[in-house]
Image (spheres, grey):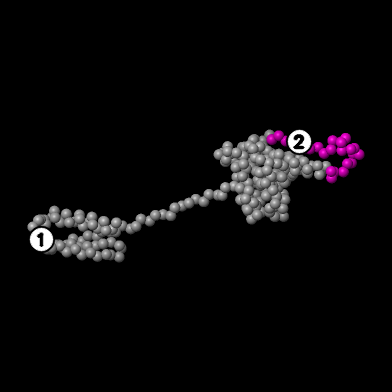
Amino acid sequence: MANASLQSFLLHHHHSFLSNGIHEGSSPSIVLKLATNSNSSISFKLFSNTTSSSVTTTASTPNSPVTPAPVTASSPPPPSLELLGSQLAERDYRQADETTRALLIELAGEPARHRGYVFFSEVQFISADDLRAIDALWQEHSGGRFGYSVQRRLWEKSRRDFTRFFIRVGWMKKLDTEVEQFNYRAFPDEFIWELNDDTPEGHLPLTNALRGTQLLGNILTHPAFEEDQEDELAAEENDTPDTTGQSKDGSKGKEKPKFMRDFFKPDYSF
């Protein structure tokens, strides 16, 4: 490119000298001196015997264009059971919680994937095997202290009262007031992302319930966890002594808690 620019420049000045009084038949003596400067520019002087003056011109060679390195944004890996198991094995519970949320969105169907969150009515489309697999990973890597089935058991022990359940699993914190009051923890800083001795049982995984509990209720009552819950209730009934003298068939036995219909505003986000 530098040679082409120099050639164009010389041709331009050749015609310029012809138009300034150098005619055919004359034999001008022209001397061209070139010099390269330290700033990568070319200087030259043209001398003619028809004049005592000289012309000095500088032509700069263009620098090579610098192509910036392409910026590639790293996208998060797609959610999978393998990724969830790896994060839980590393005790990265914060990322494991995000992966669990992404897995439920993926498993709930195309509308949920397009929307980016799960409607409570779409939980039924998640297979029992998939939910059990997610739950099994949480239990395996927490010593049985985290997981949906753990939350289901604690929810039943709270007589399906969500406020009691939230306090029990540590999703609500006690306020420093004279009267005992509780408030929801702020996400994500106020939640507990480590498994310590004082970490509440069932604290993870999280489910957004600030705008209602129907989504959480549909997860906890999913058929994936019904069989395990019936076994636990049967074991508790067998451990309860019969103090009435009546046979189990003739007594009402332990009353199962009635499902509390959610009177809060429905939760349409996850």
The amino acid beneath tag 2 is: Lys
The amino acid beneath tag 1 is: Ser
Looking at the image, residue 225 lies above or below residue 199: above
Left or right side of 132 for 7: left
CA neighbours of label 1 inside 10 A, class few (<14), some (14 to 19), many (20+): few
Left or right side of 47 for 89: right
Q: CA distance from mark 1 to mark 2?
A: 116 Å
The quarter of the rendered structure image containing the N terminus is bottom left
Residue on which the image places disc 2: 258
Most prominent secondary structure in the magenta stretch?
A: loop
At x 77%, y 37%, the residue is 257
Is residue 55 inside the magenta stretch?
no
Q: Which residue is outermost to the left?
A: 25
Is residue 255 inside the magenta stretch?
yes
The quarter of the rendered structure image containing the C terminus is top right
In the rendered image, which quarter is residue 172 located in? top right
Residue interval drawn in magenta: 238-262
Looking at the image, residue 252 lies above or below residue 20: above
Residue on which the image places disc 1: 27
Looking at the image, residue 17 lies above or below residue 160: below
At x 31%, y 57%, the residue is 62
At x 66%, y 46%, the residue is 134
Looking at the image, residue 39 lies above or below residue 114: below
CA neighbours of label 2 inside 10 A, class few (<14), some (14 to 19), many (20+): few
Q: Position of residue 52 (x, y in %)?
A: 13, 63
Left or right side of 153 for 69: left
Q: Element type at marker 1?
A: loop
At x 55%, y 49%, the residue is 76
Q: Element type at marker 2?
A: loop
Front-most of residues 189 and 75: 75
Tell me the tag on residue 4: none
Q: Earlier in the sequence, mark 1 or mark 2?
A: 1
